[in-house]
Image (cartoon, rainbow, N blue to C red):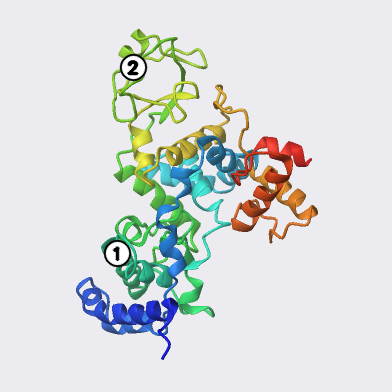
Amino acid sequence: MAAPSLRAQGADEFQTCLKTLKDDARRAGVSAAGYDKFTDGLQADLSVVKLLDDQPEFKTPIWDYLAALVDEQRVADGRALLNQHKEVLDKVAQRFGVDAATVVAVWGVESDYGRSFGKRPLLQSLGTLGCFGRRQAYFRGEWFALMRLIDQGDLRIDGPQGAAGLVGSWAGAFGHTQFMPSTYQRLAVDFDADGRRDLVASIPDALASTANFLDKAGWRTGEPWGFEVKLPEGLDTKGQGRKAKKPLAEWAQAGVKRVDGKPLGEGGPAGLLLPAGPKGPAFLVFRNFDAIYGYNAAESYALAIAHLADRLRGGSPFATAWPTDDAGLSRAERRELQTLLAAKGHAIGEIDGMLGAATRAAIKAEQQRLGFAADGRAGQKLLKALR
């Protein structure tokens, strides 16, 4: 008899895992009837296990990461939404002390203002990660928290798509501002007073819950997240970073100046953030940057939100260029690149500005043809060559 396939072995292991976890789910507050309903017919999606070590905020060059997240389209859309939701955002700021631009910036970075919630069925993804790969205990906790949210009525799966309509990222974040289920359980707010904390269908609930998160993370009302600075020649940056905070007076004494010419002032303390090393943009960051960092523990992510918030207030792009001769592409430029690749006969699927496996394979093919390093990266040099 032939040995069972790896896929079949995984399916069998998953069903065994689901049975084993039923008692754990009940101890975590999930009803027995709910657990049976949520796991009935559930199949593993082993593709999510491969994504555990593939988070873009840790692997993508900072100039590529920010070029796509803080582009002119996202700035324009965010400014329009600041006006559209001004009444709600004013009430959110009054209650939680977090300014409207920062809240809307989180919304923009997390889901492109509600356009992109993710496509993975949450119960399937979290159930799979709770049974396979590393960090199983963590993902089981998130899976059980999701079940409790449905059990309690905050989330609904009684629509035409049922549980399959409840989708998010591969790791389980979902809704307008992409809360993980346990964070949702702790910090979500029913701001529209309809009796449910609904971060999927209610924009007021999502914006208020985001502000509540930042408030609980230590947000200080009226203080900046930080600002871009110019470093003096020869400044020793060894050992500096977000956590190594000093009073602004010390930074001023060391010769650090704001790029806009304004004095540093006497506040603080602030840490020196050098996301691309001492030759790239430099920033002094305060406690509010740390609060943003708490939303997703990556400095590039926090910088994207902080910078987008500044742009929404009318601020300018960074004054200092990134230390690269091949800058990143905005989403509009990524769509243009995909269009040019498709015109050359590459099958890349939808022209959506998302650089998936098919687009990267096409990029590598064109890089090889042009004599470029075939690394699959989309930059200005390739775009200009294809134009």
Image quarter in which the C terminus is found: top right
Image quarter in which the N terminus is found: bottom left
Task: Indicate which disc residue 248 carries.
Answer: 2
Above/below status of 86 relative to 346: above
In the displayed structure image, the side of residue 251 where residue 43 appears, left or right: right
**Label 1: how many residues lie within 10 Å, few (<14), some (14-19) or many (20+)?**
some
Q: Position of residue 138 (x, y in %)?
A: 28, 61
Q: Residue furthest bottom?
A: 1
Q: Position of residue 161 (x, y in %)?
A: 53, 78
Task: Indicate which disc residue 182 carries.
Answer: none
To which residue does mark 1 refer?
Answer: 136
Q: Viewer-proximal residue, 92 or 291?
A: 291
Asked which quadrant contains residue 197, the reply is: bottom left
Give the residue type that dot 2 points to.
Leu
In this view of the protein, can residue 198 be seen by the observer?
A: no
In this view of the protein, can residue 321 be seen by the observer?
A: yes
Q: Where is residue 84 in the image (x, y as percent from the top left)?
A: 59, 48
Q: Viewer-proximal residue, 343 or 37?
A: 343
- Considering the numbered disc 1 on the image, is that residue within a helix, a strand or a loop? helix
- Considering the numbered disc 2 on the image, is that residue within a helix, a strand or a loop? helix
Above/below status of 223 relative to 50: above
Give the residue type that dot 1 points to.
Gln
Q: Where is residue 122 in the image (x, y as percent from the top left)?
A: 43, 68
Above/below status of 113 relative to 282: below
Query: How far apart are labels 2 and 1 at the CA level?
Result: 43 Å
Residue at left 67%, top 36%? 380
In the displayed structure image, the side of residue 135 where residue 160 appears, left or right: right
Q: Viewer-proximal residue, 239 or 110?
A: 239
Above/below status of 40 relative to 191: below
